[in-house]
Amino acid sequence: MKPFSLTQPKDADAAIQAHAKLPDAQFIGGGTNLLDLMKYGVMEPKSLVDLQDLSFHEIGPGSDGGLRLGAGVTNAETAEHPKVKKDYPLLSQAILSGASPQLRNMATNGGNLLQRTRCYYFYDCATACNKRRPGSGCAALKGFNRIHAILGASEHCIATHPSDMCVALVALDAVVKVRGPEGEREIAVEEFHRLPGENPEKDTVLKESELILSIELPSSNFSKHSHYLKVRDRESYAFALVSVAAALQLSGGRIVDSRVALGGVAHKPWRARAAEDFLKNKECDRDLFLEAGKLVVKDARGYGHNDFKLELAPRAVAEALLQAWKGQES
Ligand SMILES: Cc1cc2nc3c(=O)[nH]c(=O)nc-3n(C[C@H](O)[C@H](O)[C@H](O)COP(=O)(O)OP(=O)(O)OC[C@H]3O[C@@H](n4cnc5c(N)ncnc54)[C@H](O)[C@@H]3O)c2cc1C
Ligand code: SF4
């Protein structure tokens, strides 16, 4: 690891100023992703701006009956918070399906939003990777691409976004509140992460020195019928090959409203709006859910090793919707 300076500001404005002023700076939350990247030489910041003394470590009421999750709150605290478990069980379930208890105790909500892809080649500095070194090529295109994207990829990058939490946040219409040198703004989580296009080095729409303050959850009608399904190589401590956040608002057996979002299939958490539109005002039924799943992969393509996702994704969507229909166990 290369030498770096560590600054420990006491409030958000000081953190933003330090980030803007210091050479080649990165914020650091729990460090569970950034420190690995620094050890591998993938990211080599000269300055770290530590966020642990900032006052954004709380969960509290949001606007219009929603909930505000501080960016510095750990993933463990978020998943176990009584209000999250009661009103947003989808989020709790998604977070608890990720990483390990030790990691979730360290990982912060802000850091989770900005965790970087798990593409093997991104972490291996001996290989070509447009995300790590723009213009160098993409070793995954013709390489081992089992974990890679089937939707929204480009000829420059076929990586996937690895977060479980963010898939649930997209399904729940969450919004990220950020502050930077030019002031504060709010960004829907669905718009927060980018598709790779010609600039895969940019994961999100965040501007230079912008700090994530909180995640705002609107009030939800989906607490009774939601499910996070994660398909992976091991039952625990593994990233999703395909994951689905499914939520239904029901009147009798009829679908008033729904949410379907996928992880492990694209450079960003993928909201399946065509499936949601298709489900509207229909009676819940297994075959209906299978049809909705097929719509998700209508424009998908595989790159060889990941072709199995073309079949896995629609089935995972159908199963997640089925489980959401059955309702929460607890
Ligand atoms: C072995 C292993 C297994 C894992 N498995 C899973 C899994 O199955 N599912 C899953 O979803 N995740 C998984 N993770 C990833 C884990 O969830 C992330 O590493 C974690 O959420 C990152 O949070 P952090 O606070 O540690 O971020 P850090 O490592 O501190 O930071 C990550 C990035 O976020 C930036 N950042 C942090 N906070 C802010 C802020 N407030 N404002 C602006 N920028 C900020 C940093 O500058 C950095 O670029 C795994 C990680 C490991 C190491
Ligand atoms: S898929 Fe993206 S992250 Fe992976 S090697 Fe290609 S450019 Fe790099």
Image (cartoon, rainbow, N blue to C red):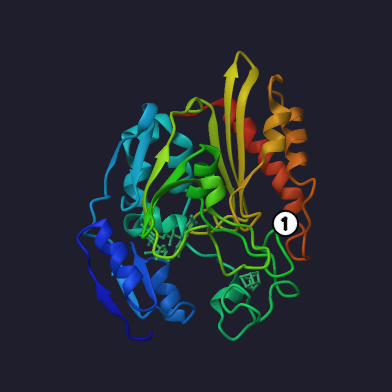
Q: Amino acid at mark 1?
A: Ile
Task: Determine the image quadrant of residue 119.
Answer: bottom right
Decide which of 271, 47 is in the foreground and name it.
47
Query: Label 1 neighbourhood size at 10 Å, few (<14), some (14-19), many (20+)?
Result: many
Report whether 119 appears left or right of 182. Answer: right
Which residue corresponds to the image point at 66% horizontal and 79% vertical from the top-left?
Answer: 135
Which residue corresponds to the image point at 28% horizontal and 63% vertical from the top-left?
Answer: 15
From the viewer's perspective, is residue 1 above or below residue 318?
below
Which residue corresponds to the image point at 58% horizontal and 55% vertical from the top-left?
Answer: 240
Q: How many numbered tags mark residues here?
A: 1
From the viewer's perspective, is residue 1 above or below residue 179?
below
Label 1: element kind: loop
Q: Is residue 89 visible?
A: yes
Which residue corresponds to the image point at 63% horizontal and 77% vertical from the top-left?
Answer: 129
Q: Position of residue 224 (x, y in %)?
A: 49, 25
Label 1 beta carbon within 8 A of ligand 2: no
Decide which of 11, 285 is in the foreground and name it.
11
Q: Position of residue 282 (x, y in %)?
A: 71, 20
Q: Is residue 50 visible?
A: no
Report whether 144 appears left or right of 238. Answer: right
Q: Position of residue 16 (x, y in %)?
A: 32, 63
Report whether 166 appears left or right of 258. Answer: left
Seen as rendered, the residue at the extreme top is: 252
Q: Position of residue 46 (x, y in %)?
A: 36, 81
Decide which of 270, 253 is in the foreground and name it.
270
**Can you identify the residue that label 1 sits on?**
150
Quarter holding ligand 1: bottom left
Task: Determine the image quadrant of residue 256.
Answer: top right
